[in-house]
Image: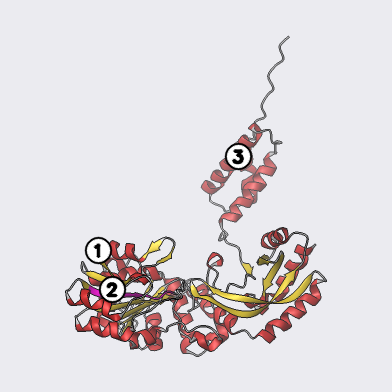
Amino acid sequence: MSSKPAVRPRPPSVEAVLSRLRASANGTDPAALSGVARAVVGEERTNLAAGVAARDPEALAAEALGRLGGFAEPGLLPVINATGVIIHTNLGRAPWPNASASAVADLTQHALLLELDRETGRRGARARAAEEHLVALTGAEDALVTNNNAAAVALAVALAGRGGIAVSRGELVEIGGGVRIPDIIRRAGAKLVEVGTTNRTRAADFEGPLADGRAKAVLRVHPSNFAMAGFTEAPDQREVADLAHAHGAVVIDDLGSGALLDTAAFGLAHEPLPSERLAAGSDVVMFSGDKLVGGPQAGLVVGRADLIARMRRDPLARAMRPDKATMIGVAMTLGLYRAGRATAEIPIWQMIAAQLETLRARGDALAAQSGPSVEVVEVRSTIGGGSLPGETLQSIGLALTTGSANRTLKALRTGTPAVVGRIEADRVILDLRTVPSSADRALLTAVRAALR
């Protein structure tokens, strides 16, 4: 006798799941309920075909309800950055100041005078507060805010039209995400004119293309994300600017990470300030908002009023402008600089300015409460985010001695709260310079859980 084929189990009907789901999700749009019910039933069918144990309609309805709740969550989790990298690209770069985040949370819930003049009732300039702060902080004639610095560079190089843009060969860099300076210039319709050599460029190298009209602009790209050492020479900025202006050309200066405070005052190499580049003859200077400025992602442009006006009128400027939330965050962050509160309230400057003695005291307290597997050690923190390459700050960390550093690192990363650290000499290191003191209790909880 031949045996009968096994009957393949079937999932509950969509209606069976929906009837239970409706009772738990009162007030939810019916289309959303139907969609999630069909999804979980479809997945149940696939699981049953693979031999997974069947679930009843109540279990599937509970899963569907959980998914509905998850749809209304941001999809990102906060983590404690204990890597020692102050501006960590993979962790969102600069954390916003509390004042900026609070202003965005409050103001974006209301209608705003975004592009309406309060006095006349007519359309006005879009959110000028951030640009007015930039003018005051840099001494520029005018300013513009774009959605990131790459957008600012693209608008700036378009000032040359179809003419040439002279760039030192040592500055034809890739600025991140596979975006390269030569590609930006060509995409803008301009012609790239290379001058000098990779390691040595002088002001005289710009004379030829400026004099014969091949170059209508000079682009200077600050190497904020790499360092060149050895037999090198860079042209004098004032000499290049004088040459360019004598031949009717403009000078565009991409500072990359940018800075509005003197990094040398904190024991780091000096990062050029926008005001210094303007004083050295640059006509347009641009830099990032989410690196050493310490605010939202944005491209910050300062310079001559006529050139800024041309950039603002560019048809692509609308595609590159930030939304209201970013404009609010940028304005609040820049306002903290004008108010003299940057090191006190902007997180990246709090990290940079943190004193070693304070970090050591925090480390001692945390280690004492963590157990014998945790030791206080001296480490070095980096700036990160394509800023001040090779520069480090002395710091204090917690070294966790466990059976497997990789396993402990994963336990910290997947725990609650999530903590991201690094491994040195087969030990997990949690660098306290990048951990705000307000997170110490949460860090202690995570360390104890990971060690268990």
Neighbourhood count class around disc 2 (C-alpha, 10 Å): few under 14, some 14–19, many 20 upward: many
Q: Earlier in the sequence, mark 3 or mark 1?
A: 3
Residue 412 quadrant: bottom right
Above-or-below relation of 442 to 14: below
Dot in front, 2 or 3: 2
| Nearer the observer, 392 or 250 | 392
293 displayed left or right of 212: right
Q: CA distance from mark 2 to mark 3?
A: 52 Å
Tell me which amino acid carries mark 1. Answer: Gly
Q: Which mark is residue 43?
A: 3
Can you identify the residue that label 1 sits on? 189
Q: Which residues are magenta?
A: 216-223
Q: Residue furthest right?
A: 372
| Nearer the observer, 298 or 14 | 298
Work out which quarter of the rendered image holds the C terminus and state it: bottom right
Q: Residue at x 60, y 63 (%)?
A: 77
Residue 95: horizontal and vertical position, in percent? 55, 73
Q: CA distance from mark 3 to mark 1?
A: 50 Å
* Numbered disc 3: secondary structure: helix
Dot in front, 1 or 2: 1
54 displayed left or right of 166: right
Tell me which amino acid carries mark 3. Answer: Glu
